[in-house]
Image: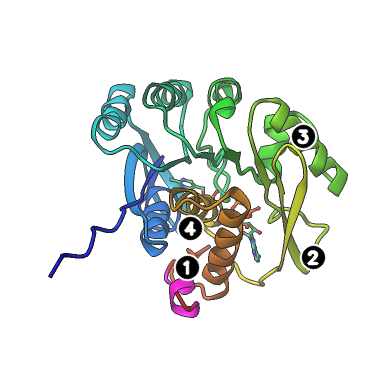
């Protein structure tokens, strides 16, 4: 009997910080990749001592350690899609940008992580301009929440037309696409509205706003699910569709662990959806 052909293994890389509590960062990304059938790889930029009560300490990796991890991936395991999360400082952003160019990595999703929900800084303020100048122009998609979009564009975002203007500006700054997330918008009380702009048109995803405190790592999980979709060969709107379903299930069926703001449930999508 002829053996069945080997399945194509799709690979995704996350360049991000470690969350010891497992709800955000590298851990959330790898769980999401695994759940969506993509082989996950990681470049660790920092180790955080973190749980559902907050970020207790941050230990950045040195630049050489980050470069060595990037090179190890680039020389042997070309990813089909790449996402970035906590990038700490300008030197790490530059190392990541340099490898994206050197190895020709496509499907780059930037989650411009700046401040954890508890208020801890995950990116140095002076590194924001390096992110916009060096990494943004290489991206297929940037996924800011509203405060991050305000920081990146320098404009305040209150209305829906502000959101559209911010997305246009981010594309003018070099991003190919923008997913502006609505979790932080107080004006939509019963709904969360995420908006995709591809440089030409807008598309909206409206979901019921779930009444839960367990939303730690939602941004990481959403961007990792989009990255997994792109690695699997989906077009951007279809990858966002998949990721929206994944994050909504993960929040709706949260695990309820920890005394504070707990993680989402990365198993929920698989266990509630016919695959
Ligand atoms: N209470 C909620 N109910 C349902 N979806 C939510 C809720 N909070 C956030 N989301 C979704 O989680 C994702 C992350 O949103 P957001 O909170 O804006 O970003 P971040 O986690 O980066 O701060 C988005 O897809 C958003 O729609
Ligand atoms: C190591 C690490 N990376 C990113 C975050 C931020 O996660 P995010 O999904 O944006 O939101 P919160 O987890 O802050 O609620 C993090 N906390 N740690």
Instruction: Give the spatial CA distance, label 3 vs label 1.
Output: 40 Å
Left/right placement of residue 50 relative to residue 135 reads: left
Query: Crowding near pointer 1: few (<14 within 10 Å), some, many (20+)?
Result: few
Tags 3 and 2 in contact by the CB under 8 Å rule? no
Mark 1 or 4 closer to N-term? 4
Q: Is residue 166 above or below residue 216?
A: above
Instruction: Give the spatial CA distance, label 2 vs label 1.
Output: 25 Å
* Pair 2/1: label in front: 2
Locate the N terminus and report the quarter of the image it occupies.
bottom left
Tags 4 and 3 in contact by the CB under 8 Å rule? no
Query: Crowding near pointer 2: few (<14 within 10 Å), some, many (20+)?
Result: few
Corner quadrant of residue 252? bottom right
State the mark number for residue 248. none
State the mark number for residue 168. 3
The reply to whether residue 33 is in sight is yes
Query: Residue under circle 4?
Result: 53
State the mark number for residue 259. 1
Image coordinates for residue 205, horizontal then vertical, percent: 71, 60
Q: Is mark 2 within 8 Å of ligand 1?
A: no
Q: Which residues are magenta?
A: 267-273
Residue at the (78%, 69%) spot, across then down: 190
Disc 3 is placed on an element classified as helix
Tags 1 and 4 in contact by the CB under 8 Å rule? yes
Query: Crowding near pointer 3: few (<14 within 10 Å), some, many (20+)?
Result: many
Magenta span: chief secondary structure:
helix
Mark 2 or 4 closer to N-term? 4
Query: Residue under circle 2?
Result: 189
Would you say residue 54 sits in the magenta stretch? no
């Amino acid at each position: 009997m002829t053996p069945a052909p080997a399945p194509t293994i799709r690979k995704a890389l996350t360049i991000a910080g470690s969350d010891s509590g497992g709800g955000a960062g590298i851990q959330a990304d790898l769980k999401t990749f695994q759940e969506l059938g993509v082989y996950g790889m990681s470049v660790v930029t920092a180790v955080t001592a973190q749980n559902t009560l907050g970020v207790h300490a941050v230990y950045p990796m040195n630049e050489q350690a980050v470069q060595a991890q990037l090179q190890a991936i680039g020389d042997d395991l070309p990813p089909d899609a790449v996402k970035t999360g906590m990038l700490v400082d300008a030197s790490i952003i530059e190392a990541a940008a340099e490898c994206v160019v050197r190895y020709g990595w496509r499907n780059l999703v930037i989650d411009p992580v700046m401040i954890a929900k508890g208020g801890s800084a995950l990116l140095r303020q002076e590194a924001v301009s390096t992110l916009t100048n060096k990494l943004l122009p290489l991206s297929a998609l940037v996924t800011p929440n509203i405060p991050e979009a305000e920081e990146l564009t320098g404009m305040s975002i209150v209305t829906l037309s502000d959101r559209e203007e911010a997305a246009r500006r981010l594309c003018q700054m070099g991003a190919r696409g923008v997913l502006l997330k609505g979790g932080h918008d107080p004006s939509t009380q019963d709904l969360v509205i995420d908006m995709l702009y591809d440089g030409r048109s807008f598309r909206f995803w409206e979901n019921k706003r779930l009444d839960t405190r367990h939303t730690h790592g939602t941004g990481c999980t959403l961007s990792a699910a989009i990255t997994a979709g792109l690695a699997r060969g989906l077009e951007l709107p279809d990858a966002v569709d998949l990721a929206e379903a994944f994050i909504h299930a993960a929040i709706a069926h949260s695990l309820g662990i920890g005394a504070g703001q707990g993680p989402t449930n990365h198993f929920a999508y698989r266990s509630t959806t016919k695959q």
